[in-house]
Image (spheres, rainbow, N blue to C red):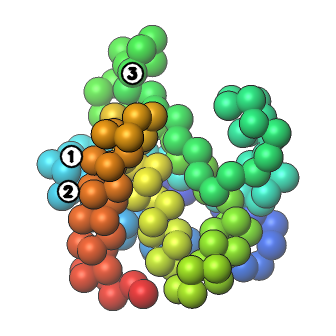
Amino acid sequence: MEINIRNKCKSNIITTHRLKKITNNVIKLVLEDRGRESAEVSVVFVDDAEMRNLNRTYRGANKSTDVLAFPMNKGKLASIGPDLLGDIVISVPTARKQAEANEHSIERELSILLIHGLLHLLGYDHMTDREEMAMKELETECLMLVEEELSIV
């Protein structure tokens, strides 16, 4: 299992060391739970300005968002390698705002966003009500696993 992590967030909301620890733990737990012991995932942490640019470029939405996922195991990119799942991009400032609004830790919010992005890389989506319900159930299961194993609240 290969997890590449890059912190491009310029604000001092959370240390790079802490981001890497949370990311490695969450991604490994969820992938192992999903039966994917061999996989490659990249995670990039950014500020709202960069997230806004990515969201505008790739989704046509001129606003920041919390998480974007770029699967690489579908379509033309699938031939690169079956274990290469793709990239997850997370806005740390947005994660902090959401953590405060939901009255939980930034570690828990980052775990939620990592799980959401990873499930997208694994082929789950929420375009229909049925897909959204199935994905939410799986997110809840994964979050319970993460909270139990890592004691994140």
User: Camera-side residue: 1 or 150?
Assistant: 150
Query: Residue 73: horizontal and vertical position, in percent?
Result: 37, 26
* Callout 1 secondary element: loop
Q: Which residue is mark 3?
A: 74
**Residue beneath the point at 75% across and 63% down:** 9
Query: Residue 151: horizontal and vertical position, in percent?
Result: 33, 88
Asked whether residue 14 is in view, the answer is no
User: Closer to the N terminus: mark 2 or mark 3?
Assistant: 2
**Residue beneath the point at 38% across and 45% down:** 132
Q: Mark 1 and mark 3: span between their CA atoms?
A: 16 Å
Q: Mark 2 and mark 1: span between their CA atoms?
A: 5 Å
Q: Residue 36: give its label.
A: 1
Taking the view exactly as shown, the residue that stands out farthest to the front is 129
Q: Which residue is mark 2?
A: 32
**Residue beneath the point at 79% across and 57% down:** 48
Q: Amino acid at mark 2?
A: Glu
Considering only vertical position in the picture, is 8 above or below 145?
A: above
Quadrant the C terminus occupies? bottom left
Query: Residue 55: horizontal and vertical position, in percent?
Result: 72, 39
Would you call the spot at circle 3 few (<14 residues within 10 Å), some (14-19), or many (20 or more)?
Answer: some
